[in-house]
Image: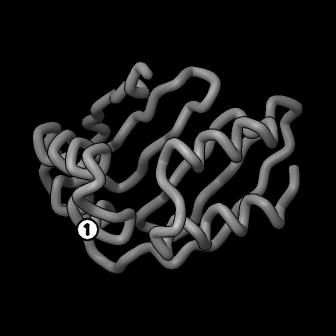
Amino acid sequence: MNVSLVQEVCRQALEAKITFPQIVGKLTAEGVESYHVDLVRHENRFYMPNGKTHVESVKHPAGIAAEKFSTEGVQSAIRASQRGEITYQEFIPRVLAAGCVLYVVYLTGKKVIYFGRDGASHTENFPQP
């Protein structure tokens, strides 16, 4: 795994210099299978098909996830991001307010699963081109 590329993707995402589709493209080209975004521990974990992993400390916007998970709140944040109305820096506080503590991006499975504090979840498939 090219750790420098992973670090650059994380930095660009936080600086709103890269979109989710661009992140997916770069990480997929690198061979990353999935990545986990832990909003509580402020870290991203990247997984390769060969078992190699990398953990990157990320300064996500601060906040505490709401106790109750809101699928509607998560979907609202996703749709606003997809429409280009909010940046990643704005997306994170919105999903935290919707009770999301962690999300897993399955690049090969083309979906993201958002998790709440009690295990509640929402699965979002990648948009079809």
User: What percent of the width, then of the height, locates residue 106?
Assistant: 56, 31
Identified by mark 1, the residue type is Pro
Residue on which disc 1 sits: 93
- In the rendered view, would you say 83 is above or below 51? below
Q: Position of 75 compared to 88: left or right? A: left
Q: Position of 120 compared to 101: left or right? A: left
Q: Nearer the viewer, residue 58 or 110?
A: 110
Q: How many numbered callouts?
A: 1
Quadrant in the picture for residue 93: bottom left
Colouring: one colour
- In the rendered view, would you say 8 is above or below 47? below
Q: Residue at x 17, y 54 (%)?
A: 98
User: What percent of the width, then of the height, locates residue 31?
Assistant: 80, 36
Q: Nearer the viewer, residue 129 or 4?
A: 129
Q: Nearer the viewer, residue 43 or 128?
A: 128
Q: Residue at x 21, y 54 (%)?
A: 99
Which element type, helix, strand or loop, lies under badge 1?
Answer: helix
Q: Is residue 117 visible?
A: no
Q: Residue at x 87, y 55 (%)?
A: 2
User: What percent of the width, then of the height, locates residue 61?
Assistant: 37, 77
Quadrant in the picture for residue 89: bottom left
